[in-house]
Structure formats: C-alpha cells, structure tokens
Amino acid sequence: MKKQSIIYAISWLLFSSAYFLLSLWLQSRGFYNLEAYFIEYKTILTTKFETGFLRTYFFTKPTMLYLGSLLISFIRQSQSTYIFNAILIGWLTNHLFLKGLKEKWNVRVFLIYLLFSPIIIYAAVSGGSTGMYLIFYFAFFALLFKYTKSYSVFHLTLLSLLLGVFVLFDLNLLKFLLLLIPVFFFVNFSKAKGINGSFYYRAAIILSNDSQRRKFFTGFFSSIFIVAFIPLMSILIYLIINKVFAGKFFYFVDGIGDYWSSYSTLYPLIFTDNSIWERIADNSLTFMLPLVFVSGLALIQLFNFDGSVTKNALVLLSLLFCYSEIAENRILNLNLHNLTLITATGLATIFYGQNLKNGKEKVFQIGIGLVIPVLMIFLEFYYFKFTINGNEKLFIQSVNEKTESEFANSFNNISSTLNKQGKGRVLADDAIHYATLTKLNSGFTWEGHFSPDFQAALQLPQIYADYIIVSKPAFLLYPNDVVAAALRRLDHFEIPLDTEILYEDEFSILLKVK
C-alpha cells in the first residue's frame, strides 16, 4: 500500500511538472491568458487594502479558481493559475492513467487520448478556468455513474457537496439539478427490490402496484431532496448575507469586474467588429461540426453499457444539455467550457461507466477503441484551428510557431515604462488594465474599482494620481473605460489637467500628471 502511494505521488508530480514546463514553453512562444492576469491581479489586491479579501472574493468568478490560486500565490516564478491548473490536471491524468493500466484493453486504448487530447492539455497549461470546469464535470459524472451502480446515499451526499461547491464556482452550473431529475427517475426503477426482468417489465410492475408506486415516488423525491439540499442551502446563506450586509443590492453575487472579460462579450474573441455575427451565421456548421464529432467519445460508449437505460440516458442528456447551451447563445457558450463538459462525460463514461468485469473483450470493440482516440485528437485540433476564441486560437498558434501579440506588447511596454519611473500613484480602470497593473513593482499604488478613493480620483486626478492609463478611442473597450469618461468630462467642463504622454500605442495611452 505504501509503495503504491509513493508511485502515485511520484507519477502525479511528473505529470504536473510536465504540464507546468509545457505552459512555460508556450509562454516563451507568445502565449498568454488574460484570465490568468485577472486572477493574479485579484490576489495582489488582497494585500493592497484593509478589506482587500472581502473586496475581491465576492467579485471574482470562478471563485474556486481564485481561492486555489491564492493558496499558492507566494510562488512568484509564475502566475499562480498556471501552477494550480498543472496540479489539478496532473492529478486527473495521473489518476485515470494508473486506473486505466489496471483495466482491460477496451479501456486501456483510451490512454492515448488521455495523454494527447488538446482539450486536456489546454486545460492544464492555459492558466484559466477551463481546468476547473473539466475537473468538476468529471467528478460530477463519475459520482453519478457510481451511484447508478451502488444506489447509495453516500454517493448522493457527495453529489450534493459537489453541487454545493458549484455555488462557489458558477451559479449557472446548478442547472445540473434539472439534469438529475430524469436520471433519478430511471435509477429508481432499477432500485426496486424483488422485481427482476427488463426495464420495461419492472416499470410496468412498479407503476401498476400501489405499494411499489409509493415506494418508487418516495425514493425518487428523497434522492432529489438529498442532492439539492446543500446547494440550495448555500444559495440561501448567500441571500441572508446579502440581505444583512448589502441591503437589496445583490452585492455578494454580481458586481462590476467579476469576470476577466465582463466589460465586453466580444473582447475574448478573434473578431473586433460587428461582422462577427454574419460570420457566425454563415459558418455555423464549421463551428458546430467539431463539437458534434467530439461527442463521439461519449456516444461510442453507449455500446458498452449492456442495455443500461439509466446510463444511456445520462450520456444522452449531458450531450443534449451541452447542445442546448450552445443553441441558446452560440457566441457566449461556443467555447471549451462546453467541450470540457463533453470531454468529462466521455472520460467518466470510459473509466467509471463501463461494466466489463464479467464480459469478454471483443476484437471489434478493441479495434474501434484504437481508432476513436486518434480520431478525437484530430478533431479537437480541428476545433482549435477554427475556433473563434482568441485565447484558444493563440494556444494552437504558439504550439506551431513563435507568435507576438500587439495587445500583450502593449501592456508589457506600459508596465516597463512605468517601472522605469520608480514609484508613484496610478489611475486606471483596473477592470480593463489589470494585466498592466500586475507587472508594476512594489513602489506603485493605484486607484481602481476596489480603491476607496477611486471616485475622488476620477474627479481630481491631479491630486490622487501621478500617472494615468487610459484606452485609446479606437480601442474596442474605450466606451467602457471609466477613466476615459472622466477625462472627457474634465475636457467638457474645461477643467485644466496638465499631462505628458510617456507611451502610446493603438490600444492605450500612458500619461504623466505634471
């Protein structure tokens, strides 16, 4: 047992180290993630003000990524999110790899996919929240598959705890409670004792018998109550805290600057003009086709369930849930968070959903298993090639060749110019220019959304600031820049502000207040 634990720990360390070194290599080739800068900036804010933690904790989504990165923020060699994701996905890869080695060839062939899947690699090295989504989706479906085998309250309680954590991750994920209703409905037919036969036979007997019908619906609603109890209580606690400390304003759930891209839904995408809507409409097949084929990782497993209606329904419901999310809002949801849902469903199905203990391996299944992983890897590369998400596009470009981003050069040049000045106070809209602020040395302080003097600094920048960072009028986020609006107001009322331009590019201007 001790030897196995040592092997497990060493292999976990090796996988995590490999992912972290790969992320450093990609960053040296021009890859960066604004979400990583956003989380890094929020961890810096915890020590900037007396109430820094409360000012940032309730305004940072996903909260779990922020808290996990905060624990290792003392490591200054890299942004903490890259290390955190390498540890998380390193554990997932290590756990499934060692588990797969003990399984039959029907499962073992999918280790190829586990090691070389672009989605899994991206989740490990991107420094964003994709890794968290993959872990939580996988844990969710793995627990569900275990419950369909054990029917135990223990697994229901773990599901409830997991969904309770979802409240701290993304409230939208509570829609999974609706996904569980049909799953528990099918499971309760299988739980009935003393009734054997096919699913349809058991259903007919249960629904035609008063006693069995009462037991069925009692177990059905009890399962839903157990799973929903902790997440619903978590929301209730949030509402109570909100009512006591914030009045009617939904302070503790929503706020300005809680997402790294909250100021513009188009900002993370590769298009910067309104023609994006026409391109999406004309090329919907191009964007949807990779998603459909990626679903094959889960769909192929339907043939290994030995007629289990519950598990088949669970896989199909997860895929339909994903497609409905995309259909609801293709621009916002056509990203790797949906692909991680499909990937996690497939991984949980392969490693926890199959029942091969008493079955013989079929040559056909092994042959299909060898083809499917390679095909899925190819189609995921295809997705990255045609994605509309700028960060995902940058990922595959950095793998192929060394790249340079004009926007990354912009905030790097501004921060280096400021650091040459030594120290000072900076006025900036930190919901837009947070990447620049994370690179400043300890001699600088700034006024931003979380600063107690931010409003006063907007009215009297000559008193509260030595330097000003403001967006250029041609920049996509210029209309959202509150500092730019404040400078326009001063200009409108002819209030003098003597400044000198220290740096300027197509995105931003760095001003020195004289």
Image (cartoon, rainbow, N blue to C red):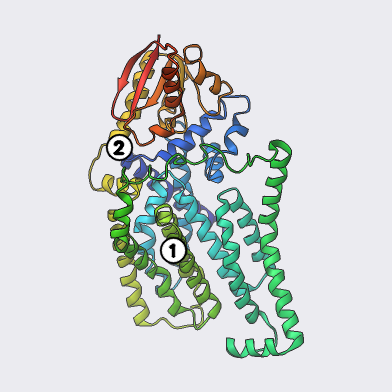
Residue 187 percent coordinates (x, y): 62, 76
**Crowding at label 1, few (<14), some or many (≥20) Cα neighbours within 10 Å?**
many
Q: Secondary structure at mark 2?
A: helix
Please name the residue shown 35% across and 73% down the image: 369
Lower sequence index among marks 1 and 2? 2
Residue 389 image point, x, y percent: 35, 49
Furthest-top residue in this view: 514
Residue 7, horizontal then vertical, whole percent: 48, 55
Left/right of residue 139 with respect to residue 232 in the rendered view: left
Q: Which mark is residue 28?
A: 2
Q: Amino acid at mark 2?
A: Ser
- Left/right placement of residue 221 relative to residue 181 reads right
Kindly report the distance in space between the C-alpha atoms of the residues bearing marks 1 and 2. 31 Å
Left or right placement of residue 293 versus residue 152 in this view = left
Q: Is residue 328 above or below residue 131?
A: below
Residue 342's tag is 1
Name which residue type carries label 1: Ile
